[in-house]
């Protein structure tokens, strides 16, 4: 495999037209620094915040073009918002009021279905994001392992029925055993109990899910599994904030939600949608994790803030939501994930594992605070 050069990437990107088809993205100065490591290419393209969606095809074209260069093993291209004075400037934020400290006993719109707890599970938390590909599954699995490292009994439920990740992330193969005619035994990995639709269907089978099937699959994975006893079940949610996600958030008796965002302002707009979704169903938001916060060059260990690090922390502060931590973009995370050995277990002393463990501690603290605020006896005792 020939080594990929930065110049080759720049040359290729010079063929991508800029917004409004004026010039190309390189000569218009929209491309950030370019990082290449092990044949993988990382950079961002600056666009106006309000045109992100419309310019997604441009981002995709740039990514595809780079991937077509011989020797390129992968590409990650992010759209980054132009900073206008006052940060998020252009976006209206009527929902930015600080969250009430107490969960209202009369649930928001009075149409909340009864959420029966799941026997054997003390608390269920969701890991969610407004948009896809921001690192939800990676965060969910490492958060679960971080909680486990703190001495808790932890399970993970892959609720992303459209694109299950847990079999790959945890290197699990085979099918779960049955305990009785309708109860499945969760799979085990690194001390976690794991359930994923990925265990139940063939990997290459295209899945067409209709609303009610989604709900029944989720209900089964939650209730027809011999979980536990578990202190915490971490649920890896599918991307998005549409009806399906909303229904899921309503179906599962959630103690709280963790929102994952990348630092770009654009992703934060989506993060805010995620936040609002949980507020609508009266689930406390435990906080925001900023993923791919900064880049650590694998050769020099030097840190680069190519994606506009810090956006999520500022936004969390502004919205009155706890900030849970910054996870750097590194090769480790991706490679260990693909190998089925998440960083928290494969390199527990590494910087990344420390970040995830610290996130886990914060999540736990917040869960305790929330259950106290709701007037429940603290379910989890953490010294
Ligand atoms: N901090 C990180 N550093 C490097 N790579 C990362 C990091 N976090 C996630 N990735 C990589 O980014 C890709 C997307 O991550 P992941 O699958 O966790 O996102 P997701 O939000 O669950 O995506 P989807 O919306 O498809 O479910 C994966 O290839 C993953 O290995
Ligand atoms: Mg995922």
Image (tube, helix red, strand yellow):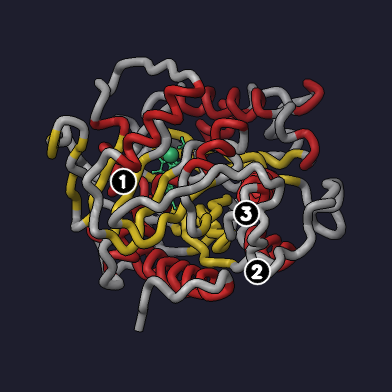
Please report whichever mark, 3 or 1, sits nearer to the chain's N-terminal start: 3
Query: Mark 1 and 2 residues: CB-CB less than 8 Å, in contact?
Result: no
- Residue at 58% of width from left, 26% of height from top? 60
Q: Nearer the viewer, residue 76 or 345?
A: 345
Pointer 2: what residue? 102
User: Where is 268 relative to 54, above or below?
Assistant: below
Please report whichever mark, 1 or 2, sits nearer to the chain's N-terminal start: 2
Pointer 1: what residue? 337
Q: Secondary structure at mark 3?
A: loop
Q: Quadrant of ligand 2?
A: top left
Q: Residues within 10 Å of mark 2 (few under 14, many from 20)?
A: few
Q: Residues within 10 Å of mark 3 (few under 14, many from 20)?
A: many
Pointer 3: what residue? 282
| Mark toward the viewer: 1 or 2 | 2
- Per the model, the C-alpha gap separating discs 2 and 3 is 10 Å
- Per the model, the C-alpha gap separating discs 1 and 2 is 37 Å
42 displayed left or right of 231: right
- Residue at 75% of width from left, 65% of height from top? 98
297 displayed left or right of 96: left
Query: Mark 3 and 1 residues: CB-CB less than 8 Å, in contact?
Result: no
- Per the model, the C-alpha gap separating discs 3 and 1 is 32 Å
Taking the image as drawn, is residue 250 in sight? Answer: yes
| Mark toward the viewer: 3 or 1 | 3
Most extreme residue toward the bottom, as rendered? 383
Taking the image as drawn, is residue 268 in sight? Answer: no
The x and y percentages for residue 336 are: 28, 49
């Amino acid at each position: 495999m020939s080594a990929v050069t930065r110049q080759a990437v720049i040359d290729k990107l010079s063929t991508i037209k800029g917004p409004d088809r004026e010039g190309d993205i390189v000569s218009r100065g929209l491309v950030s620094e370019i990082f290449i490591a092990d044949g993988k290419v990382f950079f961002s393209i600056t666009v106006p915040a309000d045109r992100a969606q419309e310019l997604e095809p441009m981002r995709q074209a740039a990514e595809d073009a780079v991937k077509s260069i011989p020797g390129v093993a992968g590409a990650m291209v992010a759209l980054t918002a132009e900073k206008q004075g006052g940060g998020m400037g252009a976006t209206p934020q009527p929902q930015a009021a600080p969250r009430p400290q107490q969960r209202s006993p009369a649930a928001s719109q009075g149409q909340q279905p009864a959420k029966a707890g799941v026997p054997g599970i003390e608390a269920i938390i969701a890991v969610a994001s407004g948009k896809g590909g921001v690192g939800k599954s990676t965060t969910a699995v490492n958060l679960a392992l971080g909680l486990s490292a703190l001495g808790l009994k932890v399970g993970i439920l892959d609720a992303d029925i459209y694109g299950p990740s847990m079999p790959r992330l945890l290197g699990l193969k085979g099918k779960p055993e049955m305990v009785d005619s309708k109860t499945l035994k969760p799979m085990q990995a690194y001390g976690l109990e794991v359930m994923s639709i990925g265990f139940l269907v063939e990997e290459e089978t295209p899945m067409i899910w209709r609303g009610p099937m989604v709900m029944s699959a989720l209900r089964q994975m939650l209730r027809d599994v011999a979980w536990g006893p578990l202190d915490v079940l971490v649920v890896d949610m599918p991307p998005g904030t549409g009806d399906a996600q909303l229904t899921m958030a309503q179906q599962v008796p959630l103690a709280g939600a963790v929102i994952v965002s990348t630092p770009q302002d654009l992703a934060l707009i989506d993060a805010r949608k995620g936040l609002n979704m949980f507020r609508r169903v009266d689930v406390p938001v435990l906080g925001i994790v900023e993923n791919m916060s900064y880049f650590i060059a694998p050769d020099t260990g030097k840190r680069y803030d190519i994606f506009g690090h810090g956006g999520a922390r500022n936004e969390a502060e502004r919205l009155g939501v706890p900030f849970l931590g910054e996870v750097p973009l590194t090769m480790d995370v991706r490679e260990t994930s693909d190998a089925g050995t998440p960083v928290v277990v494969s390199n527990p002393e590494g910087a990344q594992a420390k970040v995830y463990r610290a996130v886990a501690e914060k999540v736990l603290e917040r869960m305790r605070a929330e259950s106290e605020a709701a007037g429940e006896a603290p379910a989890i005792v953490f010294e």
